[in-house]
Image (spheres, coloured by chain):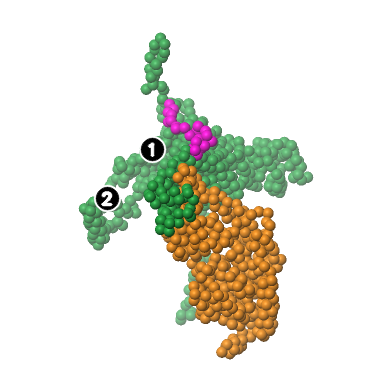
Chain colours: A orange, B green
């Protein structure tokens, strides 16, 4: 069946540019297999570094997964301290770790952003912090309640418990991150999760809350990535690599064409900026299955930014970067150099706006870009040509060009950075 | 048949058109005729605007006239509404009753009347219902009588001033000849074209046919001139009815004008009043009395804009042309008019910023054909072009602003305070700058708050000390204030605060755009940047005041804002404690907590410590912090925040009525 459908497609798409350069699938598969085995052997040999292994000139703040009871007792001791302070007439204050950009630091050895240990006092009796400290107290109470009952809620739920005080979900979300930072635990340990956003499809079998899920049999849409990673386990796969896709549209194309059957892989997308759950899931897959991760993002500064969030972590969540980042992601495409290499016509390229160019130039200064000379070269090219393109620009040669020619050719040439 | 006929016809038409052209006669038009036909150029677009422009032109003439003799202006204006029968009797027409009602435009047909009556009945019904329900009854506007086209309203405009007056023999020409004027020289004046008063007369002639009446007397003149005249529009000459000398016992000087014109008070009322108000802002040293009189007493308006200062800006001086601002024609005219004989003297004396040595250098640069002593009359047209070219290319010092007479920061500020009574005001007066050889000065004021001020930006524009009311959108001031000022950086909320922006530009030449002198274009970068800078300077001044005020307000509201969050914070803390106390009871994990903590939880479970306890303690802490902060603030800001007392300053003019009670040891003085 698969054979015949493949044949039919091939006859339709014979005239696609660069199609003739493509070797038979078996040859490509062989290169991939070699790459995959060499990757897993190299990754198993090198032990992942931790902060403790490095002797950094400053101390860093990192959080870990804590059990419900320890989160609870942490909150309780904090509240007791506050209660004593109030009763003795001194008001109260929270000592909140600063998550400002100045308190972040990129560690090249770890290839991720870490949080330094600077913190700021959040006293109640100060006009500029009174609101935040009241919100912090309220969030602490709500999380304590969750721990008591042992249930999970979403961030939205949390916001709706006291809309009048929080006013805006951004505020309760910000304080929630502050609280997990303050208590020294990951956000998932607080039993607060974000709504499902990411999806996964392909050669992966895992258990979600005890149910076995086969991601090849999830239809076209794939399986939504569970918000709490602790439910996920028993990962099995015969895939050769993980394909990280920035956009929903490209993901759909690959899922519908069953790309993972032609080249055994797992396809993941977070539909734009990745959420915590997707990042945790990717990390878990990579660690457990020991597969290389290839990324397919837009050829614009934001594509690279999304790549960096997967790879080195976001500044907002840098306190938990150890759990959230997946090091060693390869940039497969669409890269600025591909625009000319694959002769993408002018009308499919977009001029970069002032803002785009500025973002691009700023990113050239970032450490996570600088550590990879290939990326610097690509980004410099992008800023110089002032052109960007989305993954969809490849559709100019036909909707299936992406899955039929572009990706196979890229894989065949091992064209990733 | 058809085919044969058609060509002849075309021939006919062809031959007709050129014949017509031959018949056209060359006609000349007098300036008066031109302006009568294009009234809109001078701001007489429609009856309403005409009334406004009449007020405007005559008020400005009065101010110029009074200022020219350094007299503090007093202007009294009375506009009297004249109803139709009164107007008819004025022109000697007998009122005619309508006989054939259907002949008129406003005739109400049977159907229309039925409709109207039904509508009125419905409205009354609703009103009665509302009244029965106890709702507030809105007064239905009295149904206006339908006004037909012919129903024009007429106004008698009277204005008196204490100005210079006019020479007896010049009066007919000053009113009855368009484009004749005393303000044509190069200096800063309100009027410029010699149009205003004449246009009022042309308009009165067009709309009512009644002549204008002028009484005038100059200083130390034993008689008073009285003149009644209208204008011969075709010949552009005055048509004098009466011009006589009358007795002037009181040695009065000034002018009184009365003219009857068609107008529209209803629609232009607010514009006229705005104009008067803004004029009062920019000329606080003048006194205006504005009256509107009509048969309906409730429509009457009397406003007095009283004088607030005796300081008057100096009379603007007439200046000489700047070499970079002249054109070829002007050079020729200057040569024709000058008394100087040779080129050197001409350059040196007829232009600003050319000294003798400079003039010699310029002549040397002009070429071998020129010499300092050459006679002006001998200059060839080519040589004039050469002079013009050099004037354009050579570098000259900028003209100084001495010839200008800005309102002055003091007067502007006073005017703003007087008319708007703002909470805060800042003013700035820029130094003289130049565009195309014309000096100009920009003054600006920015006010916050005040009475009768709308939220957002309220822009008041002045050019050569007259308010500009129309075509605000394209004006350089409006554009600058809306687009180029970042109000939020000065802690001013562009949408919420009541912001008044006053910009006064004075120049020997105001670059008005459009036909009416109503706005200044945004295309002259020198003016645009000067306006921006002036407004910014005002904002900088305001910012520090605003910041201080915000701090003061924060002081007052700090406690309230802190207290607002006490229930939230203590509620959260207490709930956690309560949960803990409960679990402790059930699980009897007494040793989980330290002594202090165990004690605390015990108190919570025994209701010895409640939410209220926590709130009370926290409130006390807030109070203490607030007190400390207030103390700190007071030590920083000094004693300026002492409670203020209102002080009363005695008026300048009224003399003191006092009674002194003398005793051997002291004097007791009583003020009335």
Q: Residue at x 76, y 42 (%)?
A: B364
Residue B167 spot, x, y in % from top left: 49, 33
Residue B11 in view (yes/no): no
Nearest to the observer: residue A396 or residue B435:
A396
Q: Chain of mark 2?
A: B
Residue A365 spot, x, y in % from top left: 67, 59
Q: Residues within 10 Å of mark 2 (few under 14, many from 20)?
A: few
Dot 1 or dot 2: first in sequence order is 2
Quadrant assignment for the C terminus of chain B: top left
Q: Select label 1 or label 2 by which is in front.
A: 2
Based on the displayed image, in which of its 4 quarters is residue A252 positioned?
Answer: bottom right
Based on the displayed image, in which of its 4 quarters is residue A315 positioned?
Answer: bottom right
Q: CA distance from mark 1 to mark 2?
A: 32 Å
Nearest to the observer: residue B590 or residue B252:
B590
Identify the residue under disc 2.
Answer: B136
Q: Is disc 2 placed on a helix, strand or loop?
A: loop
Residue B580 in view (yes/no): yes
In the figure, is residue B247 to the left or right of B96?
right
Give the magenta-colored segment's residue range: B628-650
Q: Residue at x 34, y 43 (%)?
A: B81
């Amino acid at each position: 069946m698969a054979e015949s459908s493949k044949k039919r497609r091939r006859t339709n798409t014979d005239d696609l540019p660069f199609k003739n350069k493509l070797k038979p699938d078996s040859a490509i598969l062989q290169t991939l297999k070699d790459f995959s085995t060499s990757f897993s052997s190299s990754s198993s040999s090198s032990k992942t570094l931790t902060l403790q292994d490095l002797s950094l000139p400053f101390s860093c703040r990192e959080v870990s997964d804590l059990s419900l009871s320890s989160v609870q007792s942490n909150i309780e001791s904090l509240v007791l301290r506050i209660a004593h302070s109030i009763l003795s007439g001194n008001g109260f204050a929270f000592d909140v770790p600063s998550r400002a950009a100045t308190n972040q630091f990129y560690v090249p050895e770890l290839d991720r952003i870490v949080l330094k240990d600077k913190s700021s006092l959040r006293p109640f009796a100060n006009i500029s912090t009174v609101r935040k400290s009241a919100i912090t107290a309220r969030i602490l109470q709500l999380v304590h309640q969750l721990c008591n009952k042992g249930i999970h809620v979403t961030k939205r739920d949390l916001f709706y418990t006291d809309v009048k005080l929080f006013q805006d979900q951004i505020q309760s979300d910000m304080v929630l991150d502050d609280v997990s930072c303050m208590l020294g635990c990951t956000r998932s340990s607080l039993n607060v999760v974000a709504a499902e956003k990411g999806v996964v499809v392909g050669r992966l079998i895992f258990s979600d809350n005890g149910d076995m899920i086969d991601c090849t049999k999830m239809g076209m849409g794939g399986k939504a990535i569970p918000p709490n990673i602790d439910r996920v386990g028993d990962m099995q796969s015969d895939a050769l690599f993980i394909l990280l896709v920035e956009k929903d549209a490209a993901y759909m194309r690959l899922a519908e064409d069953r790309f993972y059957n032609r080249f055994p892989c797992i396809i993941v997308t977070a539909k734009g900026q990745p959420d915590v759950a997707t990042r945790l899931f990717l990390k878990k897959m990579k660690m457990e299955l020991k597969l290389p991760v290839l990324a397919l993002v837009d050829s614009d500064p934001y594509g690279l930014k999304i790549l960096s969030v997967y790879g080195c972590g976001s500044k907002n969540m840098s306190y938990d970067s150890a759990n959230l980042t997946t090091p060693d992601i390869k940039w497969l495409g669409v890269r600025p150099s591909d625009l000319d290499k694959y002769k993408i016509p002018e009308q499919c390229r977009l001029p970069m706006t002032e803002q785009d160019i500025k973002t691009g130039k700023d990113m050239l200064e970032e450490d996570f870009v600088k550590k990879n000379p290939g990326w610097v070269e690509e980004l410099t090219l992008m800023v110089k040509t002032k052109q960007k393109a989305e993954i969809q620009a490849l559709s100019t040669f036909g909707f299936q060009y992406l899955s039929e020619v572009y990706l196979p050719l890229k894989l065949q040439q091992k064209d990733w950075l | 048949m058809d085919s044969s006929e058609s060509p002849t016809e075309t021939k006919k038409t062809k031959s007709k058109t050129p014949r017509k052209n031959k018949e056209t006669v060359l006609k000349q038009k007098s300036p008066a005729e031109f302006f009568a036909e294009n009234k809109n150029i001078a701001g007489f677009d429609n009856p309403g605007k005409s009334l406004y422009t009449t007020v405007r032109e005559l008020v400005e003439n009065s101010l110029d006239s009074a200022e020219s003799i350094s007299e503090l202006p007093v202007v009294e204006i009375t506009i009297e509404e004249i109803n139709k029968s009164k107007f008819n009797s004025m022109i000697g027409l007998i009122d005619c009753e309508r006989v054939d009602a259907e002949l008129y435009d406003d005739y109400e047909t049977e159907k229309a009347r039925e409709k109207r009556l039904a509508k009125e009945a419905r409205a009354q019904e609703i009103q009665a219902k509302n009244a029965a329900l106890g709702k507030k009854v809105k007064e239905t506007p009295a149904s206006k009588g339908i006004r037909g086209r012919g129903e024009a309203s007429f106004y008698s405009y009277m204005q008196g001033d204490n100005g210079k007056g006019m020479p007896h023999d010049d009066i007919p020409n000053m009113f009855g000849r368009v484009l004749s004027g005393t303000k044509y020289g190069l200096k800063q004046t309100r009027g410029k074209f010699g149009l205003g008063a004449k246009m009022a007369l042309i308009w009165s002639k067009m709309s009512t046919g009644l002549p204008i009446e002028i009484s005038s007397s100059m200083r130390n003149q034993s008689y008073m001139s009285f003149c009644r005249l209208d204008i011969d529009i075709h010949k552009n000459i005055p048509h004098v009815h009466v011009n006589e000398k009358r007795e002037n016992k009181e040695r009065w000087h000034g002018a009184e004008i009365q003219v009857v014109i068609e107008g529209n008070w209803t629609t232009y009322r607010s514009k006229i009043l705005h104009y008067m108000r803004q004029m009062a802002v920019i000329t606080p040293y003048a006194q205006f009395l504005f009256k509107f009189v009509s048969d309906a007493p409730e429509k009457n308006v009397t406003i007095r804009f009283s004088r607030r200062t005796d300081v008057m800006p100096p009379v603007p001086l007439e200046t000489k042309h700047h070499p970079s601002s002249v054109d070829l024609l002007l050079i020729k005219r200057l040569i024709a008019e000058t008394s100087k004989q040779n080129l050197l003297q001409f350059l040196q004396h007829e232009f600003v910023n050319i000294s003798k040595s400079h003039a010699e250098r310029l002549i040397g640069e002009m070429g071998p054909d020129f010499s300092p002593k050459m006679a002006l009359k001998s200059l060839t047209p080519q040589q004039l072009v050469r002079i013009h070219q050099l004037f354009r290319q050579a570098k000259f010092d900028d003209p100084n602003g001495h010839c200008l007479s800005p309102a002055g920061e003091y007067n502007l500020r006073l005017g703003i305070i007087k008319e708007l009574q703002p909470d805060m005001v800042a003013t700035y007066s820029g130094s003289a700058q130049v565009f195309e050889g014309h000096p100009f000065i920009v003054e600006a004021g920015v006010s916050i708050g005040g009475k009768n001020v709308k939220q957002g930006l309220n822009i008041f524009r002045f050019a050569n000390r007259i308010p500009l009311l129309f075509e605000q959108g394209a004006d350089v001031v409006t554009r600058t204030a809306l687009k180029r000022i970042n109000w939020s950086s000065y802690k001013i909320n562009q949408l919420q605060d009541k912001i008044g922006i006053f910009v006064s530009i004075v120049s020997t030449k105001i670059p008005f755009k459009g036909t009416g002198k109503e706005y200044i274009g945004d295309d002259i970068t020198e003016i645009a940047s000067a306006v921006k800078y002036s407004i910014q300077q005002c904002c900088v001044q305001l910012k520090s005041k605003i910041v201080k005020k915000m701090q003061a307000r924060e002081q007052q509201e700090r406690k309230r804002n802190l207290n607002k969050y006490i229930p939230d914070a203590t509620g959260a803390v207490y709930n956690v404690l309560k949960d803990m106390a409960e679990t402790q009871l059930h699980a009897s994990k007494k040793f989980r907590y330290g002594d202090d903590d165990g004690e605390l939880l015990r108190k919570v479970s025994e209701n010895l410590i409640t939410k209220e306890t926590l709130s009370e303690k926290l409130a006390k802490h807030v109070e203490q912090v607030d007190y400390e902060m207030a103390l700190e603030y007071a030590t920083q800001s000094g004693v300026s925040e002492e409670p203020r007392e209102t002080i009363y300053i005695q008026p300048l003019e009224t003399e003191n009525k006092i009674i002194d009670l003398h005793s051997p040891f002291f004097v007791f003085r009583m003020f009335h």
